[in-house]
Amino acid sequence: KSMNNAHEGMGMTNGHMSHTNPLQLAPSTGENELAIPPLLEPDGKNPAHYSIVAQEGTTEFYQGVQTETYGYNGSFLGPVIRIQSGQTVQFTTTNEMSKETTFHWHGLEIPGEGDGGPHEQIEPGQSKKLTFPIRQQAATLWFHPHPEGQTAEQVYKGLAGLIYVEDENSQRLGLPQQYGVNDIPLIFQDRQFDDQQQLNYQQFKNNDGTIGDTLLINGTLNPKLHVRREPVRLRLVNGSNARNFTFMLSTNEEFQQIATDGGFLNSPVPLNKLTLTPGERAEIIIDFSKLSTSIDLSLINEEGVVLLPFTITNERTTPQKMQDVFNQFSTTSEEQQLPVSKRLELFGMGTMVTINGKQFDRTRIDFVQQQGVTEIWEIYNKPDMMGGMTHPFHLHGTQFKIVSINGQAPPLNEQGWKDTVSIEPDETVKLAVKFQDKGIYMFHCHLLEHEDNGMMGQVKVE
Ligand code: C2O
Ligand code: CU
């Protein structure tokens, strides 16, 4: 791996250049065992009650150096909240930071007033309690702050955690499900440390997406993972502000994608390459039972940079047999034929990003939709003179179906529930969207600097 000058290729002002800041091995630290976020135990049953506290602290990424960070129930990132579909849950969210924040549940189907968008600010020292039923299917979701204009910095400094929804189906499929052993959460984030090893967001902020040269997985620098000779399930989360990750295995072997943002695919999709834009998740299975312990295998990105090396131990297990059918997802012919009822055009760059020519205004409702009614949203990414950028489009409060991409059916591994979809310049994506609940929900680009710069609007469900 090259150890170039860390700032080579950093475009501090020009947006398009910023996307060439390659990842590299963090200097002056060896390999570290991958951190596994703690599972958050409910502190009350019936309804299952969870306490989530946003706080400031310090984290030792580099030996002997304290980096100032934010976290949930800890100093960096947060716990995994594992909830069961059909259950009613109660969250008490508390802001112990010195600035306001919100708690947004990315991917959760939740009434608008609990969704944690920019309207639901929690002042320092304040708490808020939410109670809601979980009705959606098993999925890997996440949570992070969403204060107006401040989301990028708060996520960058460490505010993000995971929600696992489990259901009867997820438990009967024969999937690896030993948390942290063969069912592994992986939150990918790139960061730029300054010369004091601090996460100085304002110094490196880029209006088209702050890209860092240093990878953290679950907050671990230069992580490595020990696995047994068995199928291992990786829950991949792109939790970075702006970097896209294209995952591959260093041997170019196939792996199986089994889930999208909001649920299982109908059956595993074999891939040797998988791209996730910021906000997107995927679950994959790598079968280590077929591999020898001496093999040098890593998860790498498209540029060949090692993201996560695996150490395969000699231990074997007798895994359950996996079912063949995981889900019953389909796009109905009715959904294929519905006329477009909402059109959105994404345009611009830097501080000039817009949706339908407008920037976010919390007093303006951009669209209205009826509860329980499916509508087709058509989203076009209009190129500019420089070509334009890929925008990961995210909608709150629901999971949608991708009906088409430029008139074609989406690839097999996107034929599943989604809440974030990558839209390339000049691409038109049609979504079938239905909300279970009422309220005001955001839609926006999940490149966090674009979101903060106003590439966001509101739909009111009534
Ligand atoms: Cu993950 Cu509106 O955000
Ligand atoms: Cu964008």
Image (spheres, rainbow, N blue to C red):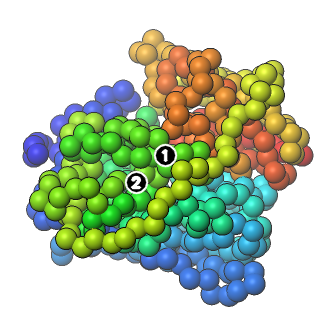
Secondary element type, mark 2: strand
Q: Is residue 210 left or right of residue 133?
A: left
Label for residue 268? Answer: 1
The image shows residue 59 at horizontal and vertical percentages of 32, 72
Label for residue 458? Answer: none
- Give residue 231's quadrant in the image: bottom left
Instruction: Please give the name of the residue rendered at 49% of the width and 15% of the height, measured from the top-left corner.
Output: 384
Q: In this view, does 67 lie to the left or right of 86?
A: left
Instruction: Please give the name of the residue rendered at 51% of the width and 38% of the height, measured from the top-left corner.
Output: 413
Compared to residue 106, the image places residue 390 above or below, namely: above
The type of residue carrying mark 2 is Ile
Real-space Cα distance between discs 2 and 1? 9 Å
Quadrant of the image for the N terminus? top left
Front one among 411 and 431 = 411
**Residue most toward the top?**
385
Q: How crowded is mark 1: few (under 14 residues within 10 Å), some or many (20 or more)?
A: many
Asked if the residues shown at circle 2 and circle 1 are in contact, with their CB atoms under 8 angstroms apart, the answer is yes
The image shows residue 93 at horizontal and vertical percentages of 64, 73
**Residue most toward the bottom?**
44
Q: Quickly name the residue at label 2.
A: 285
Front one among 291 and 73 = 291
The type of residue carrying mark 1 is Pro
Front one among 85 and 369 = 85
Secondary element type, mark 1: strand
Q: Which of marks 2 and 1 is nearer the N terminus?
A: 1
The image shows residue 257 at horizontal and vertical percentages of 45, 46
Instruction: Please give the name of the residue rendered at 57% of the width and 28% of the height, measured from the top-left corner.
Output: 410
